[in-house]
Amino acid sequence: MLLAGGVLVIVILVVATYLLAIKPVYDDKALKETQVSDADLELTKLRRQLADLKVKSADAATYTAELKAKKTQLPDSYDIPNLLRQLQTSDTSVKVDNNAVGVTTPVTVAGSGIVVGVPITLTATGNADGLSKFVNRLQNTQSRAVLVSAVNLQVDGNETTLTTTLTAFCSKSDDDDCKVNEK
């Protein structure tokens, strides 16, 4: 009986040692292995992000050049007289007569506190090829950012008339006599 009691005490000591000393070590090891796996996964994600950022940073000079070019198309004031001179030059170069120009009240572009649009309506006459080139120059060639929003073409015999609605943009108004309508 003494022997059975001694074996029971030894079994209890082994189980207690396992539960109190060895099992927590294994649990801690398993936890650390999980943390290492998570850290490896995060490291892989970060390496991918770093590779993507390196690719993008290689294009930084291109993006900077594009930004500078776009900023030059967005002057700091309306400067309507200069814009009209540019349009007149464009008219002459594509052999189109600009008969009428209507400029309305500037409005702040929705979603932007610094970009202002000046709605303009142009009426021009000429042949279809010249008018097509004129619209293309308005949207793509000239140095000022404009958006052509409507084009109406009327043909009457030999005379073709084009009415264009566009918006010229600037980054802010320095003109005291131009009031901006909030839209």
Image (cartoon, helix red, strand yellow):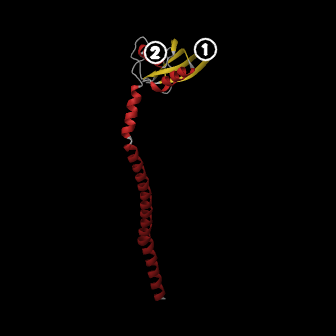
Q: Nearer the viewer, residue 59 or 52?
A: 59
Task: Say if mark 2 contacts mark 1, CB within 8 Å.
Answer: no
Say whether residue 139 is left or right of residue 155: left
Q: Which residue is drawn at the image coordinates 43% and 64% (left, top)? A: 33
SS under mark 2: helix
SS under mark 1: loop
Q: Position of residue 116 (x, y in %)?
A: 46, 21
* Rendered position, 37 above or below 58: below
Q: Position of residue 136 (x, y in %)?
A: 51, 25
Crowd around label 1: few <14 · some 14–19 · many ≥20 (10 Å)? few
Residue, disc 2: 88
Q: Which residue is drawn at the image coordinates 39% and 28% (left, top)? A: 71
Q: Which residue is drawn at the image coordinates 46% and 76% (left, top)? A: 15
Q: Residue furthest left?
A: 61
Q: What's the mark number on residue 4?
A: none
Q: Position of residue 12 (x, y in %)?
A: 46, 78
- In terms of sequence position, does the residue under pointer 2 or pointer 1 come before the other? 2
Say whether residue 136 is left or right of residue 156: left
Amino acid of disc 2: Gln
Q: What's the mark number on residue 158?
A: 1
Q: Nearer the viewer, residue 122 or 175?
A: 122
Q: CA distance from mark 2 to mark 1?
A: 22 Å
Q: Nearer the viewer, residue 175 or 82?
A: 82
Amino acid of disc 1: Asn
Q: Position of residue 13 (x, y in %)?
A: 43, 78
Q: Which residue is drawn at the image coordinates 41% and 55% (left, top)? A: 43
Q: Residue furthest front?
A: 158
Crowd around label 2: few <14 · some 14–19 · many ≥20 (10 Å)? some
Q: Nearer the viewer, residue 92 or 78?
A: 92
